[in-house]
Amino acid sequence: MDEFARAVEDGLKLSKRLVLPGGVPPPRPPAGMERTVLAASAAGPDPRLLPTAPTAYAVVTDPGAVDTPDVPSYQPYVYGRLDPPALIPLQMKEVDLAVDCTLDTAHVTLRARWWLHCITRSRECDVRIVVPMGEQGSILGAEVTIGRRSYNTQVIEVEDNTVENHGQIQSGGLLKPQLFFLTMPQVEGGADIYATFRWSQKLLFDNGRFSVDIPFRFPYFVNPLPKVFMKREKIQLTVNSGFSKEVLLQGTSHPLKEKGRQGDKLSFLHEAVVENWSSKDFNFSYSVYSADLSGGVLVQPATLRDYDDRDSFCIFLLPGSGNRKVFRKAVVFIVDTSGSMQGKPLENVKDAVSSALSELVQGDYFNIITFNDELHSFSSCLEQVNEKAIASATDWMNSNFVAEGGTDIMHSLSEAMALLSSVHDALPQIYLMTDGSVDDEHNICQTMKTEIINKGSKSPRISTFGLGSHCNHYFLRMLASIGKGHYDAALETASIESRILKWFGRASSTIVANISIDAITCLDDFEVDSEYIPDISAKSPFCVSGKYHGKFPDTVIAKGYLADMKEISIELKVQHLKEIPLDKVLATQQISLLTSKAWLSADKQLERKVIKLSIQNSVPSEYTEMVLLQTNLDKADAKQKVKQKLKGRKGPDEARIPLHGLKLGFGDRDATRRNLTTGFGDERPPEKSVIMRKASGCCSQLADCFCCMCCIKACNRMNDQCAIVLAQICAALSCLGCYECCSEVCCGGSES
C-alpha cells in the first residue's frame, strides 16, 4: 500500500493548483498536520493517506488537466505524464450509511455522491472508488452511476469465454483484505458520481457484548466548501438479535436516536447537517441480557429460488455472563518454520505463541513442535505450566524458530496426536499454524478423521491458522471442522499476532464440550454445514447451520459436558422466522464450509450447490466470478437490460470486466515448494515512483514534488527541451506561491 499512499500524496500536491469559486483555495489541513505530513513523507509515504472511509479519487496521468471545472484559473500549462498516476481525493457531497445487525453478522449499505472537482470540464480522467470494510468484510455488490453510464456488479458462474478478461486488473477487486475498489474510466471533469456499495461483516464479540465497527473517518480534504454545498449525514441502524431477550445498549460513536422497538428488533437514526464529515469510525455495541447459556433455533422454509429444496435452520447460542468454568487444557502448538516463513511472519508467530503461553494457567499442559523438512519438539512429553517451563519454552523458541527447509504437516500432526494420547484430566488441543500448501492434504484430513472417530469424545480438538495466500485455506477450514476446533487466518503481516491471539482465545476457552442435538432423531433429514458440531466457547457465539426435512418440535434440547464433566441440558425454543433473511445472514459461512466439503470430496453436486448459493446471495465463491457490468443507458432501453441481466445475458452495449482478488484459491503448492515469501498482499517488491517523464533526450530525474521545497535536478547535461520544461514548471510553481523552487544543473550547467 506504500504505492497507493505515495500516489495520494502526489495527488494532494497537485490539488494545490486548484482555485475554487471566489478565488478560495482548497480546504487546508488541521493546524500542525501539514508539517507532520511533510516530516513523515521524508521517511516514506504517510499511512494516514490510506483510505479510512469510502473515498473516491481522480486518477491523474496528465497534470495539465487539473483545474477547477467551472471557473478555470488559466494556470501555466504543465508538460509531462505521471507514471504511476497521482490520486486526487474527490470532495464528497452526500453520505448515507445503513447497518442491519442480525445474529453475529452486519449487512452494510453505503450510498455516497462525489463530484470530479479537480479536472477541467473539457478533459476526462478515470475515477477510482475505494471502500474499506470491517471485520471479515465480504463485498456483496456495487452500483455506480455517472451521467448516462451505469456500472453494476454481478456474480456469475465461471465458464469458458464467459468473462471478458481485458487484462484490466485495475478495474476493480481487492487492493488488500477488506479494501474493495472500482475504477470507472473516462469521467468528464465536473461530473457527479453516485455510488452504492453493499457488504457483510462479522460483529465483534467480547465479554458478552456485540459490536459493529465500520471505517467512517473522512479526511479533511474531502470536505467541500460549506458556502457551496450543504453536507447532510445520515446513519440508520437496526438490531435484530434473534432472541426473545432484552437488548441492552452499551455505546455508540455517533448521536443515534432510538426510533422504534418491535419485539427483539430495534431501529435507530441519526440525520443532521454537519460542518465536516465524520472524523471517527462508526461503532455501535449492545448485549443480549442472559445470566447463563441461552439461545434458540431459527428455522426458515425453503423458497423457489433456494439452491436446496430442504428448509434451513440455525442453532445460535450465547455463552452468557454466568462465568462458566473453562476446561483445563493440554495444548500442543505446531508451528511451520519452513523457509517461506522467514522474517516478520515467523517473528510475529513467535511473539503470539509467547503471549498465548502466558495465558495458560496452573494445571494446564503444553508442548511446542516446529516443522519443516524435519520435526523438532520443545520437550519429549507434555510439560506442566509454570514460570520455569514457560521461560524455558521462550528461550527454546528464540533458538529454534529458524526459517529453513520445506513443509511436512502430516508428521507433526501425528506427533502431536501421540503426545496427547495419554491425557485424561484435560481437554487435548492442537494449534496448527502454517503458510504452505502440501500434496497430502486430502490424506491428512482422512487420517485425522479416522483418528478422531476412533478416540471418540476424548479426541484432540484441532484448530488451524493460515498465514498468507499460499496455504490452502479450505484444507485448514476442513481440518478444523473435522477436529471440532476453530479456523482463522491472517492475510497481512501486520495482523498476524493480533489474529492468532484472538483465535487462541476462542479455541482455548471451551466451557461446554461434546454437544449433541436431540432434534436429529425427530427429523426425516438433518444435515449440518460443518463436519461436526463444535464445542461452546466463552469468547464467541455458537452458530451451527444446515438443512433439514421434517418438522421441528417446539423446543429442542442441546446437551453437552461441563469442565467438571457434569452433563448440561440447554432448552432452545424454535422460532419460525418471517422478517430475518436467514439465507443472507448465513450465506458467507455456508459457502466457505460447503466449498471445503466440495474440495475434500471432489463432489460436483456440492460445487453446484455452492454456485447456486453464491449467485443467489451475490457472494463470490471459488466457482463463481464477480464482474463489473458497464451499461450505456443512451443506446438501449433500461428495462430490456434488466431482463437481460436477470437471464445472465449481456446487452449489446454491456461489457463484463472481471474483478480481481476476491478468491482465496486452493493453495499454491509450487510456491510452497519454492519457499516463496510473497504470500502476503502487503509484501511486494519496492517500486520507485517516477512522477514525470518526457520524450527521449529529456532529463528523467525530475523530482516528485509540485509545491514548496521543490528541487528539480537535471542529470549530467541539459538540452533545450529540458530547459523549456523546467522553465514552464517553475512558472507554474511560482503561480502557486512556491518561492523556494530551484533547479540545479550538474557538470557546468547554469542555475535559474
Image (spheres, rainbow, N blue to C red):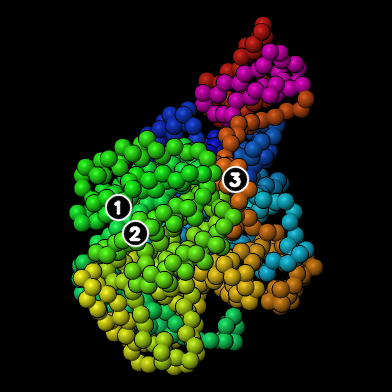
Question: Whole-percent x and y of residue 252?
Answer: 31, 62
Query: Outermost residue, top direction?
Result: 748
Whether the residues at callouts 2 and 1 have beta carbons within 8 Å, the answer is yes
Q: CA distance from mark 3 to mark 2?
A: 30 Å
Q: Write down the residue under mark 1.
A: 382
Q: CA distance from mark 1 to mark 3?
A: 31 Å
Disc on the earlier residue, 1 or 3:
1
Residue 469 horizontal side relative to residue 636, left or right = left
Q: CA distance from mark 2 to mark 1?
A: 8 Å
Q: Would residue 217 be visible to someone looking at this image?
A: no
Disc on the earlier residue, 2 or 1:
1
- Choose between 431 and 632: the one closer to the eye: 431
Residue 673 numbered tag: 3
Which stretch appears magenta? 697-726
Q: Quadrant of the C terminus?
A: top right
Q: Write down the residue under mark 2.
A: 420
Numbered disc 1: secondary structure: loop
Disc on the earlier residue, 3 or 2:
2
- Choose between 336 and 36: the one closer to the eye: 336
Question: Whole-percent x and y of residue 590?
Answer: 51, 72
Above or below — where is 426 with respect to 338? below
Q: Nearer the viewer, mark 1 or mark 3?
A: 1
Magenta-colored stretch includes residue 702: yes
Residue 179 numbered tag: none
Q: Residues within 10 Å of mark 3 (few under 14, many from 20)?
A: some
Numbered disc 2: secondary structure: helix
> The disc labelled 2 sits on which kind of residue?
Leu
Numbered disc 3: secondary structure: helix
- Choose between 285 and 661: the one closer to the eye: 661
Q: Residue at x 48, y 75 (%)?
A: 529
Question: Whole-percent x and y of residue 104?
Answer: 39, 69
